[in-house]
Structures are given as structure tokens and as C-alpha cells.
Amino acid sequence: MPVRRWMRNDGIKWLCAAGVLIYLASILLMPYSQIAIYSVWEKEMYAFRPAFVLDNYARAFSNELYRRVILNSAIVATSVTLVTAILGYALAWYLAMYANRWRILLLFLLIVPLWTSFLLRAYTWKIILGRNGILNSFMMDVGLIGEPLPHLLYSKFSISLALIYIFLPFVALPVYAALEKMPRGYLEASADLGASASATFRHVALPLSMPALTAGATIVFCLSFGDFITPVLLGGTGDLMISNVIISQFGAAFDWPFGSALAILVLLVVLGLVALLRALGQWSARGAA
Amino acid sequence: MSHSNPAAPGWLRLLSLAIFAFLYLPLIVLVLFSFQDSRVLSWPIEHWSFRWYEALFSNRQIGQAVVNSLVVASSCVLVTILVGVPLALALRRLPRRVAALFERTFLLPLIIPQIITGLALLILLNRAGISLSLLTVILGQAIVWMPIMVTVVYARLLRLGPELAQASTDLGAPPLATFFLVTLPNIRGSVIGAALLVFTLSFDELPVTFFLTGGDNTLPMHIWSMLRIGITPEINAVATLTVMVSIGLVLAGVMTLARTFRR
């Protein structure tokens, strides 16, 4: 009887594994691999021809325009990640250590915007930062400035500001969860043993929350790097990011193979970063333990 | 935690306050300026009015877009439940280590920029000769939001532990009876909570829809095309309504999840 039961359990296990694998292969692997396939095809007049060439990749790196677009994306994503990491961490620290009875309410306030429309939250910055927008007209009304500040909108600044606004909870929430789980005794022990507040932070709290910080920062970087909405709404002509070029290749430019090659570059950046930061997070957690 | 914490340093309290102001002032601006009369969006608001809401409700295209978005979002919820719950149950049966690896793979569509998922599906559908419609939008969105359903339900199953289902099986209940009478009532809260979140996200989704829609516009697609033409207070009105409905749904979803995970 135990043998038969073991076999039945094992059979179910294999069935479950097979089901999950079939889903992942058909729903994830199959579509994503199409991009890789197309990226080595050739464009021929108004059709795409199966081939195996790396011309599309070469074009992405050799052309000044595309190099700049990739650089733009990297600059915006890096600055957004740095600012959200710092601000998000500080906010999480406040919530976990000091918020007391306001904590649940503040957490709610942090979670709610996360689920509202990305598009609309980017749009609000367009009406706030415009030349005759709400910020400029408000500051003129109260006499802070004489005439509108010209460069608030249509710059990397406005793109980054909107993305920081949208992604800040992505860092604050996981870091909060990590700090909240951390036994308070660790901090007290460190203080009792004579460590200064900053030493306790650097050697105890920071390493323990590092995996959460890197996880949040990774997501922020990836999603900022691949965003196409804020550059269109809030960027100038020179601030286009890589996703905008990819979209135009699938639209007016009608060069799917080249667009696919650019998409593969984005995928490589994203997956590479996920792997790197994961390794980093594990390494630093091991250092703490 | 029962003991009270010491007071926060002044700078940290100030910074946190500033961050919350930063998170909410834009939303407040959005709402306030949907109730002003002028076509130009600038400070101060001279006259208050409902005219942009009236314009909104008489706009037939927006009405149709809202209907399309509702159809897409509810179908997406249905698909993620029908596929996601069995997937979560299957994950639960696997050894923890294997399940963790699969779970990380499941999460990919949330980390990979959505336009890439959109164009991957576009290429696939194109090669399969399937024409674009709201159906393909539903398919794309179900794929993107599936991780939410799977991971939330899986997390709940992990908390539940296998004992209840085992007891039911040991007492001779057939697998289906165990599922409907034991497992389902226990994961119902997590399914409903995840469903509310998926509905909200799907209703607001743009990048995947952008690639996969045929002739029909969803609400975000319609707003996107309105924004390309120019900004009007009408957009503020539709934005205010959308954000308010989202906030309501998310509050319901988060509270359901908080309750079901506290048990």
C-alpha cells in the first residue's frame, strides 16, 4: 500500500511539473523566441525573409542615432533607479521603524497609486510641468518667479521625474517588508555591543535588507529602461528611448527584424541585470549571516 | 509589535512627508483640474464646472472604449482564474526548490518591459495567421497578468499547508470533492483579491494592447490617441474617473488579501 501510494503521489508530481512546463514553454518561451528568430532575418522590400545574419545587431551599434537612443535609456533608467533606491529606502525605514499607529494607513497610501494607470500618472506631469502649466503658473501667481521656467517639460528631467514618481513604491514596499521582518533584537544587540547607529545600519540592517533593495531596484531599472510612454508624453525630440525606436520599427518604419534585434538587446540588458543583482543580493546576504 | 518605537529623526519625518506629498499632489491636481471651466490648464482655477464630465458622457467613442475595456478586463480575469489557479495548485505539488525556480520564470512578464511581450505575441500571431482583435488583446493581457494570480494563490496555498487536503483524501474524499469542499473555500479570498488586482491592471493596460488590438480601442488606447492630439480638460475628467474606480477596486482587492492572509 505505501508503495502504491508513493507511486500515485509521484505520478501526480510529474503531471504537475509537465503542466507547468507546458504552460511556460507555450506561453512564454514560444513568443519570446520569435523575437530572437526575427532578429536574424532580413528585410526585403515589403517582406521579411528567413536568414541568419547579424546585420540588424551591427546596425544597432554602428549607427550614431541608435547608440544615442540606447544611451538615453541607460541614463534615464540609471538615474531613476538611484533616486528611487535612496528615497524608497528612506521611506521604508521610516515606515518600519517609526510609523507606529499610522503604519497601516501609510502602507495603503503607498500601495494604491501602484495599481492606478501608468499612462494617466505620466500624463499628470505634462499638465504640471508645461510652460504654461500648473507649476509655472502657480509659482508666478505667488511671485516666486517672474516668467515661466522653460525647461521643466520635454527633457530627460521630466521623463525621470515621472518615472521616479511611478516607481518609488516598487523599492519602498519590498524594503519595508524586509525591514519589518528583521528581528528588532539584532539592532538592540548591535547597539548594546557598542556599535554606533551608523555602524549598526551598515553592518546589520543594510545587509539584511539588501536582497529586497536589489530586487526592487532591478524591477525599476528594467521597467524604466523599456518605457515608451513617458518619452513620448514628456520627452523632447532628442530624448527618445529604445522602446520608441522599437515601436517605430513595428509601425511606420516597418522593419520587424531590426526592431526584434533591438528588443533582444533590451531583453539581454534586463535578464543580465536580473541575474547580476540576484547574485549580488545573495552574496551580500551571505556576508551578513 | 507591541512596544512603541522612539520618535523619528526630524529630517526623516520631513522627507517621508515630502515623499507622500510627491506621490499624491499630482493625483490631487488631476482631480481638481477636471472640475475647472477653462480650456487652459493653469493656476489659479477661476470657475468650477462639470462641463468636461458632460462632454465625456456624451462622447460615444469613449463610451465604446469603456465597454471594450470592461470586456477585456473581465475576460482577462476569467482566463487568469481558470488557468492560474490550476497552475498554482500544480506548483504546490512540486518540491519547494523546483517550484521556486518555476515561480521566478512565471514572474518574467512582470519584469520584462511589456512592449516586448506585446511584440513577441504580435510576431507569433502574425506567423500563425491570426488577425488582431479584442480576443488577441485578452490573450496578451492574460499572459502578462497571469503571474499575479499564480503567485498570490500559490503563496496562500503555501500558508495553508497540505494537512487539510491530506486529511480529506485520507478520509476517502475523491480529489474533486477535496478541491471544491476543502481547498477552494480556503483560497477563495486570495483568488478574489488577485482577481480585483488583475481587473484593475488589465483595465489600465496600454503597451501590450498597443500591439495586439485590431480596430477596437480600449480606454487607455483611446486616451493615448487623445493625448497625441493635445491635452484637454476632458482627459482630466476621464482620468479622474478611471483613477477613482481603480483606487476603489484596489482597496477592495488589498483588503480582501490582507484579511485572507492574516487568517
Image (cartoon, rainbow, N blue to C red):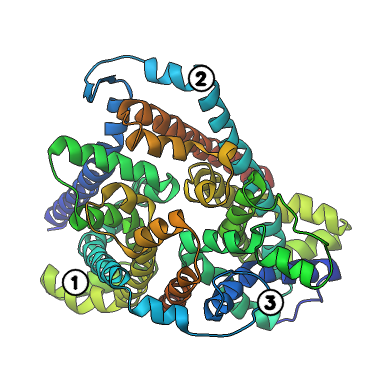
Q: As shown in the figure, which amino acid type bears the numbered disc 2?
A: Asn
According to the picture, the residue beneath numbered tag 3 turns out to be B44
Q: Chain of mark 2?
A: A
Q: Which mark is residue A63?
A: 2
Residue type highlighted by circle 1:
Phe
Q: Is residue B110 left or right of residue A111?
A: left
Camera-near label (3 vs 2) is 3
Chain ID at mark 1: B
Whether A80 is drawn above or below B22: the answer is above
**Residue in the picture at 70% in, 58% down:** A87
- CA distance for labels 3 and 1: 60 Å
Name the quadrant of the C terminus of chain B. bottom left
Q: Secondary structure at mark 1?
A: helix
User: Which one is nearer the viewer's eye here, B202 or B82?
Assistant: B202
Tell me the residue that label 1 is attached to: B179
Q: Callout 3: residue from which chain?
A: B
